[in-house]
Image: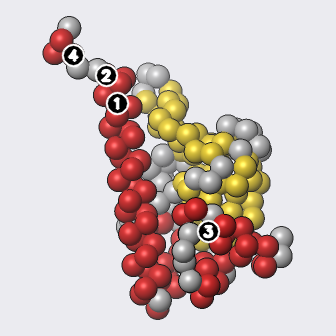
Amino acid sequence: MKLESLAKILKEHPFLEGLEQHHLDFITGCASNVVFKKNEFLFRAGDPGNLFYFIREGQVVVEIYIPGKGPTEIQSRGKGDVTGWAWLIPPYRSTFDVRAAELTRAIVLDGTCLREKMETEHDLGFILMKRFAALIAERLEATRIQLLDIYGDRSKK
């Protein structure tokens, strides 16, 4: 995929909306196009957390292994979503498994590359940290609601 088309795809992604062109150029320098077959893992819990993905097509599921139960889906991501934030927070380790539920096309970003660029381009770092903080808060709230739904209010039983 040509760098121009990769830059165009990233510019059109909702997560990067409104970024200045030079910030998009920085980000594009850390990006590449990837395809995952059904049931292929994007990353596994415990893996180095150096990558994150902008999902272009398809769907991925976020899973956690529960002893005695096995892999358990906790969330899913589809077109237009971002998955992976371990690249931002030391010790940079993935805490979940993320698996393609179907053929999935994505843009992968090298978090190590982007962290280094954010150190020199503080404005970009601040913008991305704010956006990822909002994303993490949203995902934690969704997980909390899901857990409430799964376990319910046991005091009423």
Question: From where the camera sits, is residue 92 visible?
Answer: no
Q: Quadrant of residue 83?
A: bottom right
53 shown above or below 154: below
Identified at 52% across, 57% down, the residue is: 84
Image location of residue 111, percent across then percent down: 54, 71
Cβ atoms at labels 1 and 2 below 8 Å apart = yes
Identified at 63% across, 45% down, the residue is: 78
Determine the secondary structure under disc 4.
helix
Cβ atoms at labels 2 and 4 below 8 Å apart = yes
Identified at 62% across, 85% down, the residue is: 21
First in sequence: mark 1 vs mark 4: 1
Determine the secondary structure under disc 1.
helix
- The residue carrying pointer 4 sits among few (fewer than 14), some (14 to 19) or many (20 or more) residues within 10 Å by Cα, namely few
Q: Residue furthest left?
A: 155
Image location of residue 128, percent across then percent down: 45, 72
Determine the secondary structure under disc 2.
helix
Q: Which residue is mark 3?
A: 109
118 shown above or below 148: below
Distance in Å between CA atoms under marks 1 and 4: 12 Å
Question: From where the camera sits, is residue 129 visible?
Answer: yes
**Where residue 151 is drawn, which disc sits there?**
2
Identified at 60% across, 88% down, the residue is: 22
